[in-house]
Image: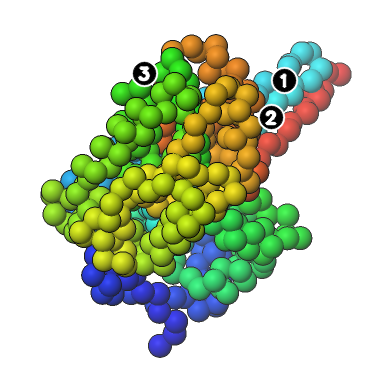
Amino acid sequence: MGQVLKCVSPIDGSVFAEREVLTKEAAFGAAEKARAAQKDWAALPLSERAELVMAGVAAVGAMNDEIVPELAHMMGRPVRYGGEFGGFNERASHMASIAEEALAEIQVGEDETFKRYIKRIPHGVVFVVAPWNYPYMTAINTVAPALIAGNTVVLKHATQTLLVGERMAKAFHAAGVPEDVFQNVFLSHEVTNDLISGNAFDFVNFTGSVGGGQAMERAAAGTFTGVGTELGGKDPGYVMEDADLEAAVDTLIDGAMFNSGQCCCGIERIYVHESLFDVFVEKAAAIVNGYKLGNPLEESTTLGPMANVRFAQEVRAQIDEAVAAGATAHIDLFAEDDGGAYVTPQILTNVTHDMRVMRDESFGPVVGIMKVSSDEEAISLMNDSEFGLTASLWTKDLDRAAWVGDQIETGTVFMNRADYLDPGLCWTGCKNTGRGGGLSVIGYHNLTRPKSYHLRKVTA
């Protein structure tokens, strides 16, 4: 028996699922099947490809009663939140609805002598490496538009959510998407590296850690394979003096704590104008003290365990270091905190950017809150990060928010909302958050290549 991937449930530390990885030969064979199937798939009418993809999406939705508890077992999200199908369907539906326009030929001009235009051509075989925190929604961001655009897709999912890719492939195949067109694979890091460096794929989309993204780029070096990445984040919120305070507290604290803080665009640092600071912190602590930490399979649980004990220990280490350096912790230890995957959510004040909790990605239920006196101070602090995914601004003044947003080094600027992905907008980042862009028209552009036609007419 070869190497086996094991999903260890954060609920109780038991092995929930395991799968054997493909050998190098079998993995290359899967990529070759995808390449052989791609031309026939791309030859189908765009509308037919979109219909098949949406049928696959619907088939995933039909599995939701099984998927929700399965996700709780694999990564700890409470069943009360109902899974991810709403966002999964919204994103796929939007990409299907804009496909014809996004992939349309660009007409440059035609006269008696020439016809000129640009086509969008699918890359070929797209390799999607998806993360565990929102395993269905993050995967569909690329899977749906890649297939609709005429690519074939090979999906490798995170070990923590081992069964997600398998379910997606089963649903899509049942809906009529050919098996070689959309494949789920179980791979070791070594074989993944071999596939990318061996030019098995034409485009790679990776969502995960900075180190993982660097490994993808190293593997692709010299192959001229495109690599799109969404990596770490340390997303800020800024509450201005004219903000709707109740809405700001509710949304930003939910953005920091939902899914046990394990959100790509979760709020990890908050800057509050000095006139609102004390009441903001008081209200934030009251919200967090109302959470119920516990078994995610129980309907009363509002905060489940973190996906892995290792992740939980990093959060505890950041909190302990901050407190030792002078930070104030506002939440007492929850009785359900077991020192393992079940972590007390925490709010910290008296924090500085010398502390790791305000610099390093926490990806857990902790947020630091700092007092600021001006837009300029807030902008400087928000930009004092190696990451740039989203920033959340709270004010009644749209022009002010737009001006502040122009100064922030980030991929998305939110005003009076946070922790949401609008499929009509490009999902992108800067700095160590990575490069590329998903969803929107730009998502289609990144999953295709331009091909120019300069046709001279015979006029003799």
> Dot 3: within a 10 Å radius of its alpha carbon, few (fewer than 14), some, or many (20 or more) residues?
some
In the image, what residue type sits under mark 3?
Asp
- Vertically, is 225 above or below 289? below
Q: Where residue 23 sits: x, y (%)?
A: 50, 79
- Label 1: element kind: strand
**Residue 332, image x, y percentages:** 28, 52
Relative to 426, is 183 on the left or the right? left
Looking at the rendering, in which quadrant would you find the N terminus? bottom left
Mark closest to the chain's N terminus, 2 or 3 = 2
Question: Compared to 344, does 257 lie above or below?
Answer: above
Location of residue 103 in the rendering, given as x and y in whole percent from the top left corner: 56, 31
- Residue 452 to residue 319: above or below: above
Q: Residues within 10 Å of mark 2 (few under 14, many from 20)?
A: some
Q: Which mark is residue 108?
A: 1
- Figure quadrant of residue 2: bottom left
Q: Which residue is mark 3?
A: 244
Corner quadrant of residue 429: top right
- Could you give the CA–CA distance between mark 3 and mark 1, rounded to whole angstroms? 48 Å
N-term mark: 3 or 1: 1
Q: Residue at x 34, y 41 (%)?
A: 88
**Whether residue 313 is situated above or below residue 60 in the rendered picture:** below
Q: Is residue 221 left or right of residue 129?
A: right
Tag 1 and tag 2, C-beta contact below 8 Å? yes
> In the image shown, does 70 or 403 lie closer to the viewer?
403
| Gap in angstroms between the C-alphas marked 2 and 3 | 47 Å
Q: Which residue appears farthest toward the right when viewing the image?
A: 460
Mark 1 and mark 2 lie on one chain; the one further toward the N terminus is 1
Q: Nearer the viewer, residue 49 or 349?
A: 349
Residue that extends furthest to the bottom in the rendered view of this protein: 1
- Select label 2 or label 3 by which is in front: 3
